[in-house]
Image (tube, grey):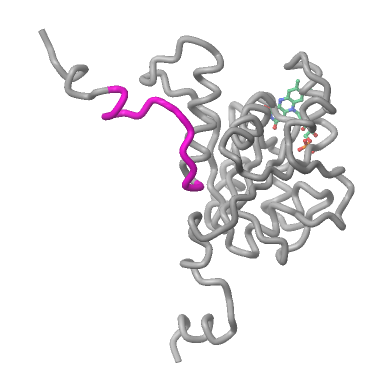
Amino acid sequence: MGARDVNEGMGRASDTENRPERLPKRLVVGLSGASGVIYGIRLLEALKQLRIESHLVMTKPAQITIAYETDLTPKQVAAKADHNYGIEDIGASIASGSFKTGGMIVAPCSVRTMSEIATGVTTNLLTRSADVMLKERRPLILMVRETPLHLGHLRTMTALAEMGAIILPPMPAFYAEPKTLSDLVDQMVGRALDLLGHEWPMKRWGEDLPTPKRGKRS
Ligand SMILES: Cc1cc2nc3c(=O)[nH]c(=O)nc-3n(C[C@H](O)[C@H](O)[C@H](O)COP(=O)(O)O)c2cc1C
């Protein structure tokens, strides 16, 4: 019996079962205390427009960055989600693998939250929910924001990539011709949703941004 047969025999979720198109239109959104809380906020707005059920959990430092970086209160941000959970509520639905979701996006993801997810020593609902994604082989996207990065940060990212997480640092793409801050944010939100098989309007190289014109030299 090969490894594949053993896995199937034990009823383990196969890669096919966890393809984005086969998972429910329901996503977990984690907001942690890194700069760039606007990414998570915009993501919640995008999910509402796309009619994807959102389940939000935010850390206490995220509430502090909301105050520093936006004109909103944490309550107003929470109201953008379909479901909102307290960070200590480890009995919430999203703490269990039996609650099916299409994956999780942590936007933004602080180094502290990233490191906790990498160890599996989860101390709050956000990191527990991320751990569930890894153990259930569901998509986990971490929009890690810190700069510069030391070797420990880089090693932690490698470990997470090896475990199946996707590291998606919010890095603006200037070839997409952003005119406003919203353009930059929306482009990153689009890239995150692309990874989960959802379509969000953004400029695409070779489509909205035709390469031939740009390649021409006078
Ligand atoms: C305004 C502000 C900006 C911050 N930016 C970052 C950041 O970009 N990356 C990061 O890892 N931590 C950042 N921090 C520090 C984190 O909030 C801190 O490490 C916190 O413990 C993270 O906790 P959490 O992961 O539970 O949200 C920032 C803090 C503040 C107040």
Residue in the picture at 85% in, 34% down? 60
Q: Position of residue 65 (x, y in %)?
A: 77, 23
* Closest to the observer, 27 or 89: 27
The residue under the point 64% across, 30% down is 45
Answer left or right for 119 relative to 218. right
Stretch in magenta: 196-209
Residue 62, x across and y down, in percent = 78, 30
Q: Position of residue 75 (x, y in %)?
A: 84, 28
- In the figure, is residue 101 to the left or right of 120? left
Occupied quadrant, residue 201? top left
Q: Nearer the viewer, residue 86 or 164?
A: 86
- In this picture, residue 174 sits left or right of residue 180: left
Name, please, the residue furthest toward the left: 218
Relative vertical location of residue 84 with respect to residue 13 in this rendering, above or below = above
Residue 25 is covered by the magenta coloring: no
Which of the image's four quarters has the C terminus?
Answer: top left
For this rendering, which residue is in front, 16 or 46? 46
Tag count in the figure?
0
Examine the image and state in which quarter residue 107 appears: top right
Image point 62% across, 43% down: which residue?
A: 105
In the image, farthest residue toward the top? 218
In-image side of 205 versus 129 (left or right): left
